Amino acid sequence: MLVAVPLIASASGDPAIDTIGTAVSPEELAKFFVIMPDGEGLPPGSGTAAAGLPLYAEKCAMCHGENLEGLEGTGAPPLAGGRGTLATKKPFKSVESYWPYASTLYDYIWRAMPFHEPGSLTPDEVYSITAYILSFGKIIDEATVLDAKSLSEVKMPNVDGFYVDNGPDRLIYRAQGGATSK
């Protein structure tokens, strides 16, 4: 694929010469992906909570804590707990209490984690860490094998705690109780 943008004023008159851009290989293009809330875009692979536990201990616990509680000073949020707290005076935001889609968890881990090596995990490792986090919060059974199909079917505890506010110039998912997420 060649991404080409014609120049405003052509110096030579030949659009094949007067372009800005470079050829993009399929490997380079593969770095840009979108995983939708319904799971569209999830890669092939699979994982379990049992496989995720040692991966979490090695790659995640240093920031998120051994019990997914988040560690002060790391900036890493808690990943478990807080169900039913968003509409209270002290909301506790975590994967378990706030995130409306399991595919979003997969997407975030795959793109941004671990913090010191983002994008270094394989799809199987991400499925396994996702399975561990979801099983820790009792969202899935620890024997569940996560893959593109099964992850898409996971119903998060707060999926019904959001509504679409698509007013002028915005599409915002608002959590019940006033918190917002774009």
Image (spheres, rainbow, N blue to C red):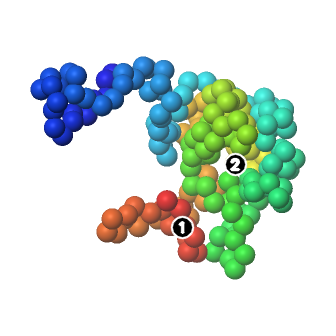
Nearer to us of marks 1 and 2 is 1
User: 27 and 54: which one is in front?
Assistant: 27
Image quadrant in which the N terminus is located: top left
Q: Is residue 106 visible?
A: no
Quick check: 168 above or below 114? Answer: below
Name the residue at 68% across, 30% down: 121
Name the residue at 17% across, 30% down: 11
Q: Which residue is mark 1?
A: 180
Q: Which residue is mark 2?
A: 139
Please provide percent x and percent y for residue 109: 65, 41
Badge 1 marks a residue whose secondary structure is strand
Instruction: Please tell me which of labels 1 and 2 falls first in the chain.
Output: 2
Quick check: 105 above or below 89? Answer: above
User: 73 and 6: which one is in front?
Assistant: 6
Q: Residues within 10 Å of mark 2 (few under 14, many from 20)?
A: some
Please provide percent x and percent y for residue 162: 52, 63
Q: Residues within 10 Å of mark 1 (few under 14, many from 20)?
A: few
Residue closest to the far right: 66
Name the residue at 63% across, 74% down: 87
Q: Is residue 159 visible?
A: yes
Q: Say the numbered circle drawn on residue 31.
A: none
Name the residue at 67% across, 33% down: 126
Badge 2 marks a residue whose secondary structure is loop
- The three-letter amino acid code for the residue at tag 2 is Ile
Quarter holding residue 172: bottom left
- The three-letter amino acid code for the residue at tag 1 is Thr
Residue closest to the far front: 11
Residue closest to the far left: 13
Please provide percent x and percent y for residue 52: 77, 33
